[in-house]
Amino acid sequence: AEGHGAVAAAGDEGADEGDPYGEDEDDDKVSDGWMAVRNTSELRHAHSVAVPTNQDSIYKGPVERAPRAFAALRVPKKLQGALPFASKLQNQIAGKKGGKKGTYAKARAVVRDPGERKRATLLQAMATIGNQKKEKAAAANAERIAKKAKEDERRAKKFKPLKDMERKRKYREMGKEEAKRRKAAGFDS
């Protein structure tokens, strides 16, 4: 066991347990008396020692924090008159409709610089244009589907007599073929 690294910490106690990983050791290793070092979990298991716990790491219950209160955003009347669109102060109006109180992100006041305001306005305008395009495309698609259904119905009505005659001819031929087969098989006498 000299020169082969560390020897098992528990001595010969674990020698009869075999390889913990299910692999068989070579005969020459066993004949040399060499045995692998057991890791901490194997030693704890062999000696029935529990895993130590750090008391600082144990949760002692839910952490209670006081809700943060923010002052309402007050916009002067003069500034309100200069705001664009009919949906002025929509966040405050939405809060008064009896819905549940807004989240932290909705409650805090966001003061944007002029560049951010322009970007936000542009993005909102682009989103509005995109939504209008989608609505227009959906209406056109519904109209196209209705037109196609009407055309299909007209076509079906026009060709129904021809299809009926073709179906009768096909079934008549199938009946004749079946009669020939039954006669050849000797079922009809």
Image (cartoon, grey):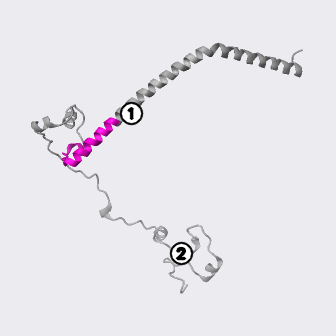
- Residue placed at 55% from the left, 84% from the top? 1
Q: Amino acid at mark 1?
A: Lys
In the visual, does 155 lie left or right of 126? Answer: right
Between marks 1 and 2 in the image, the one whose residue lies nearer the viewer: 1
**Residue carrying label 2:** 13
Tell me the chief SS of the magenta region: helix
Question: Residue sitting at 23 percent across and 44 percent down?
Answer: 118
Q: Quadrant of residue 50?
A: bottom left
Q: Is residue 82 visible?
A: yes
Q: Residues within 10 Å of mark 2 (few under 14, many from 20)?
A: few
Say if mark 1 contacts mark 2, CB within 8 Å.
no
In the rendered image, residue 63, in percent from the top left (x then y), is placed at 26, 52
Spot occupied by residue 39 in the image (x, y as percentages of width and height)? 48, 72
As drawn, the residue found furthest toward the top would be 161
Magenta segment includes 114: yes
Q: Residue at x 48, y 22 (%)?
A: 146
Q: Is residue 125 above or below residue 189?
A: below
Q: Position of residue 97 (x, y in %)?
A: 22, 31
Numbered range of the magenta stretch = 103-129
